[in-house]
Image (cartoon, helix red, strand yellow):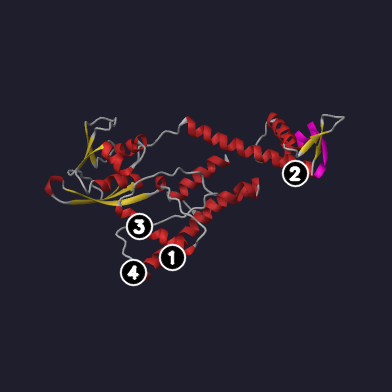
């Protein structure tokens, strides 16, 4: 539950979908009361990060004004502490010059503030508003296209050329083909066909040509271009389960060591029962898992078996 709650909270905070900051804090406070501070420390850290990011953003805006730096693009950055948030993949995306200038300016500003922190950009969480100019029936029409960072990078390539092969787009952006296909399809197959694809199928081949759709039109001035959702793969589910199992291993070991430190010696059944009782407020531990952890602690010389009674464990200080 904690692992999934953390992922959903991260989505709500980063995509500004949270209905209220107070509601999030209230929920975290209830979880803290029920499950303890260790359970909610990362969730609290995430909410704090968002507030700190607003302060950094204000300082960055003042820095640009003071230094009279002219950015062609407005930039908002959320600086997150790695330890609090779910793990996000990095990529080697080649950013267009418009974005590169922004990122380098922010990096220079951030390096002035702190020397012992390193920024790692997670483009998959970014979003952008791109001004698109179209000519349906010969008249100039502009739309504010609200897109992800990846979609924006694809669209900006079409400032240089009206048509491009998929393989060329991949060469320019340096993104994995499967991922890039999803972003390209969202721009030419979905509700808003900002690009057209030839041949017009739902499969993308390296030789397919994508063209800027000059005739694109919509009633709304601001358009939120949806992404083609990637299905949650079994791999991702397994990865979450593995993370949870790893965390539980540590929790079981910590409980056993705490008990044995106090009791100095204890029989197997009593130790399993006490460890289960302690852990019950977080999760229902499997006795087999507890037994495995005890064996592991004996192997690592935290505990030892009594020479005359193999069912009795002793704590080794």
User: Is label 4 in contact with label 1 (beta carbons under 8 Å)?
Assistant: no
Mark 3 or mark 2, earlier in chain: 3
Magenta span contains residue 195: no
Q: Secondary structure at mark 2?
A: helix
Which mark, residue 102?
3
Residue sitting farthest toward the left: 138
Mark 2 or mark 4, earlier in chain: 4
Residue occupying image coordinates x 16% and y 47%: 135
Whole-percent x, y for residue 226 in the image: 34, 42
Q: Closer to us: mark 4 or mark 1?
A: 4
User: Is label 1 in contact with label 2 (beta carbons under 8 Å)?
Assistant: no
Mark 4 or mark 1, earlier in chain: 1
**Camera-nearest residue between 213 and 97:** 97
Q: Which residues are magenta?
A: 262-273
Residue marked by disc 4: 68
Whole-percent x, y for residue 210 in the image: 23, 38
How crowded pointer 2 is (Cα within 10 Å; few <14, some 14-19, many 20+) is rated as few
Q: Closer to us: mark 2 or mark 4?
A: 4
Q: Secondary structure at mark 4?
A: loop
Quadrant of the rendered structure where residue 150 is?
top left
Q: CA distance from mark 3 to mark 2?
A: 50 Å
Q: Secondary structure at mark 3?
A: helix
Q: Quadrant of the C terminus?
A: top right
Mark 3 or mark 1, earlier in chain: 1
Q: Compared with residue 305, is residue 140 higher up or lower down, i.e. above or below?
A: below
Whole-percent x, y for residue 181 in the image: 32, 35
Q: CA distance from mark 4 to mark 3?
A: 14 Å
Mark 1 or mark 2, earlier in chain: 1
């Amino acid at each position: 539950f904690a692992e999934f709650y953390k992922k959903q909270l991260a989505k709500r905070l980063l995509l500004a979908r949270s209905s209220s900051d107070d509601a999030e804090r209230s929920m975290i406070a209830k979880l803290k009361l029920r499950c303890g501070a260790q359970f909610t420390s990362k969730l609290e850290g995430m909410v704090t990060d968002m507030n700190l990011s607003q302060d950094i953003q204000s300082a960055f805006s003042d820095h640009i004004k003071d230094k009279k730096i002219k950015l062609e693009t407005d930039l908002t950055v959320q600086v997150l502490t790695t330890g609090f948030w779910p793990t996000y993949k990095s990529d080697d995306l080649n950013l267009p010059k418009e974005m590169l200038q922004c990122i380098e300016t922010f990096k220079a500003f951030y390096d002035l503030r702190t020397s012992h922190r390193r920024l790692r950009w997670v483009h998959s969480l970014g979003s952008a508003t791109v001004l698109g100019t179209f000519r349906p029936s010969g008249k100039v029409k502009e739309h504010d296209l609200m897109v992800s960072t990846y979609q924006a990078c694809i669209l900006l390539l079409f400032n240089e050329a009206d048509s491009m092969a998929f393989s060329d787009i991949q060469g320019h952006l340096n993104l994995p083909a499967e991922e890039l296909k999803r972003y390209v399809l969202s721009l030419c197959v979905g509700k808003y066909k900002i690009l057209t694809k030839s041949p017009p199928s739902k499969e993308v081949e390296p030789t397919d040509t994508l063209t800027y759709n000059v005739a694109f039109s919509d009633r709304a001035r601001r358009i939120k271009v949806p992404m083609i959702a990637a299905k949650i793969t079994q791999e991702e589910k397994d990865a979450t389960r593995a993370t949870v199992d790893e965390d539980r291993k540590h929790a079981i070991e910590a409980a056993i060591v705490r008990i044995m430190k106090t009791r100095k010696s204890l029989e197997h059944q009593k130790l399993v029962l006490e460890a289960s009782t302690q852990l019950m407020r977080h999760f229902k531990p499997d006795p087999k898992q507890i037994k495995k952890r005890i064996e592991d602690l004996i192997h690592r010389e935290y505990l030892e078996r009594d020479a005359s009674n193999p069912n009795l464990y002793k704590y080794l200080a």
